Image (cartoon, rainbow, N blue to C red):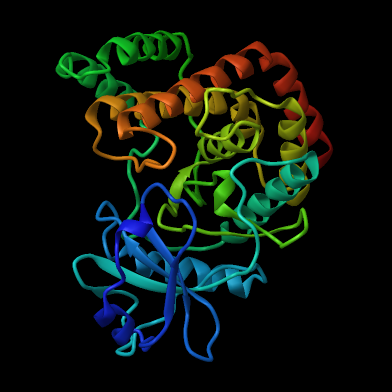
Amino acid sequence: MTATLTVPQDVLERFGLTGAEAAPLGAGLINHTWLIVPPGGQKLVLQRVNAIFPPAVNDDIAVVTQHLAAAGLETPTLVPARDGALWVESEGNWRVLTHIAGTCRNALENAAQAREAGALLGRFHRSLAGLEHRFAASRLGVHDTARHLGTLERALDEHHGHPDYGLIAPLGNRILEMAAALAPLPATPDRIVHGDPKINNVIFAAGSDRARCLIDLDTLGPMPLPLELGDAFRSWCNPGSEDTTETSFSLEAFGAAVEGYAAATAGFIEPGECAAIVPATLTILVELAARFCADALNESYFGWDAARFPSRSVHNRIRAEGQLREFASLREQRAAAESLVERAVSPAR
C-alpha cells in the first residue's frame, strides 16, 4: 500500500527533513508509513494519516504519549514541524514521530512473547488510569457490534451483482448466525485504552521476546476494558495471522498473555471486567469477521496486499474466514479459557 505513494518534498521541507531518505515501513491497513533517515540524523517515522482520523487526533496522541513517558514507559512521540505544528497538510495530513527500534510480528512465536505483550498492555492501561483528558478524536461506537452486523446485512442485500457474491454470501450468513447466538456483553466502565492492540502494533526488542512499546496510537480513547482485551487476545492468540484461513485460538498463548496482564495490573482490573474477557474476545472475533466480510463486498475500507491476493475482495474474504475459524476454535475451548482467566487474576485480587 505505502509503496504506491510518494512522499511530497514540501512535507519533508516543512519538517526540516530535506534530503532525507524515505523507505516504506510496516504493513498497516490504514495509514501510509515510511522510515525516514535524515542526513546525519536519527531515524524517524513519517505517516500520511488516513482521512478517517481528524487532525485533532494528534493532539490526543501528544497528551497521552507525554503522560506515558512521564510514567517511565517507552513510547513514540510526535516531532513538531518547523513551525511547531504537530501535523502538516499536503494532499492529506502528515506527521513525524520518533522511531523505536525493534521488531514487529504478524503472529506470536511463543508463550514468552504473549506474556510480555500482556504485561506491556497492562502497564499501558495502568499508567493511563490517572490521566484526565477529553479526547478530541474519540472513535465513538468503534465496537458497536450491532452496527457492524447491520453493515454486513446491507452489503449482502446491495451487492448481489458482485462477481464473488456466491462465495461471500454463505460466509456472511454464517457470521450473522454465530453473532445471533452470542449473549450481550455486561456493562463495564470505560477506561483509556489503545483501541487497536493487535500484535503488529507491539514493538519487541530486536532479537528478544521483550515487548518494548505500543505503536499506532490514532485509536486512543475511552472504551470498556474487555473489548480492548478481546481485540488484543483475538490477535495475539491466533498462530496463523489475519491473512490466512488456517487459524485457531491458542490457549497456551492466551494463558500466558492473561498471566502477564494480571501481573502488571494487580488490583486494577475489576471482577466484572475479568468475567467479560472471554465473551468479549468471542464478540470481537465475530465483529471483525463481519467487518472483513462486508468489505469483501463493499471494497472501500481495508487495505489489501496486491502481491499476495488478486483483489481487495479476495483478501478480505480470506480475513473474514480466518476470524470466523478462530471464533469457532475459541468457542469450543471457552470453559478452559475462562478457567485460565480465573487462575491468572485470583492471586492478583
Nearest to the observer: residue 261 or residue 212: 212
Q: Is residue 202 above or below residue 85?
A: above
The number of discs equals: 0
Instruction: Point out residue 47 in the picture as x, y percentages from the top left corner.
Output: 38, 66
Left or right side of 102 for 2: left
Residue sitting at 78 percent across and 39 percent down?
111
Residue sitting at 57 percent across and 35 percent down?
241
Report if residue 31 is visible in the image. no
Residue sitting at 35 percent across and 32 percent down?
310
In the rendered image, which quarter is residue 24 located in?
bottom left
Report if residue 164 is visible in the image. yes
Instruction: Point out residue 293 in the picture as x, y percentages from the top left corner.
Output: 35, 24
Nearest to the observer: residue 165 or residue 255: 165
Residue sitting at 31 percent across and 33 percent down?
311
Q: Is residue 138 above or below residue 171?
A: below
Q: Is residue 43 above or below residue 349?
A: below
Nearest to the observer: residue 323 or residue 330: 323
Look at the image and tell me in which quarter the C terminus lies.
top right
Instruction: Point out residue 252 in the picture as x, y percentages from the top left corner.
Output: 77, 30
Instruction: Point out residue 247 in the picture as x, y percentages from the top left corner.
Output: 59, 24
Nearest to the observer: residue 295 or residue 86: 295
